[in-house]
Image (cartoon, rainbow, N blue to C red):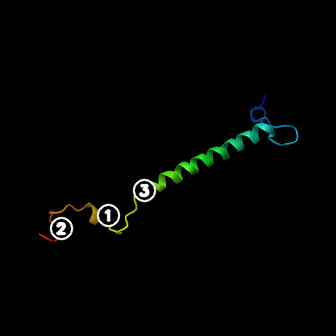
Amino acid sequence: MSFGQAVLVAANVDSNGGIGFLGFAVIGGLGLVLVFLYRSMRRQLRRIDFDADATSDAERMRRPGSPDGDASQ
């Protein structure tokens, strides 16, 4: 048995060139997994804390009382 024949047998390719039920089931399963991954990602993105004050990263990282930080000293 050649490599090409082994691949066709493993992929369950029928004589008409289609992939049959196994291919349909794999594609359907991948689609279902993508739906669950999308829902999970959307839920995680909603949990991100949005900075309404629009402060920069440098401003948030400064500690009060540091030399480059609070100007009120």
At which x and y percent is residue 2?
77, 31
Tell me if mark 1 has few (under 14), some (14-19) or many (20+) residues whose alpha carbon lies within 10 angstroms of its own.
few
Q: Nearer the viewer, mark 2 or mark 1?
A: 2
In the picture as drawn, the residue positioned furthest to the top comes out as 1
Q: At 44% from the left edge and 54% from the top edge, which residue is drawn?
A: 47
Q: Quadrant of residue 72?
A: bottom left
Q: Quadrant of residue 28?
A: top right
For numbered disc 1, what is the local secondary structure?
helix
Tell me if mark 2 has few (under 14), some (14-19) or many (20+) residues whose alpha carbon lies within 10 angstroms of its own.
few
Residue assigned mark 3: 48
Residue assigned mark 1: 57
Closer to the chain start, of discs 2 and 1, is: 1
Q: At 28% from the left edge and 65% from the top edge, which residue is drawn?
A: 58
**Label 3 to label 1: alpha-carbon separation:** 15 Å
**Label 2 to label 1: alpha-carbon separation:** 15 Å
Q: Is residue 42 left or right of residue 4?
A: left
Q: At 66% from the left edge and 45% from the top edge, which residue is drawn?
A: 32
Q: Nearer the viewer, mark 3 or mark 1?
A: 3
At which x and y percent is residue 35?
62, 48
Closer to the chain start, of discs 2 and 3, is: 3
For numbered disc 2, what is the local secondary structure?
loop
Amino acid type at image mark 2 = Asp
Q: Nearer the viewer, mark 2 or mark 3?
A: 3
Q: Nearer the viewer, residue 18 or 62?
A: 62
Q: On the rendered image, what quadrant is the N terminus found in?
A: top right
**Label 2 to label 3: alpha-carbon separation:** 27 Å
Closer to the chain start, of discs 3 and 1, is: 3
Residue assigned mark 2: 70
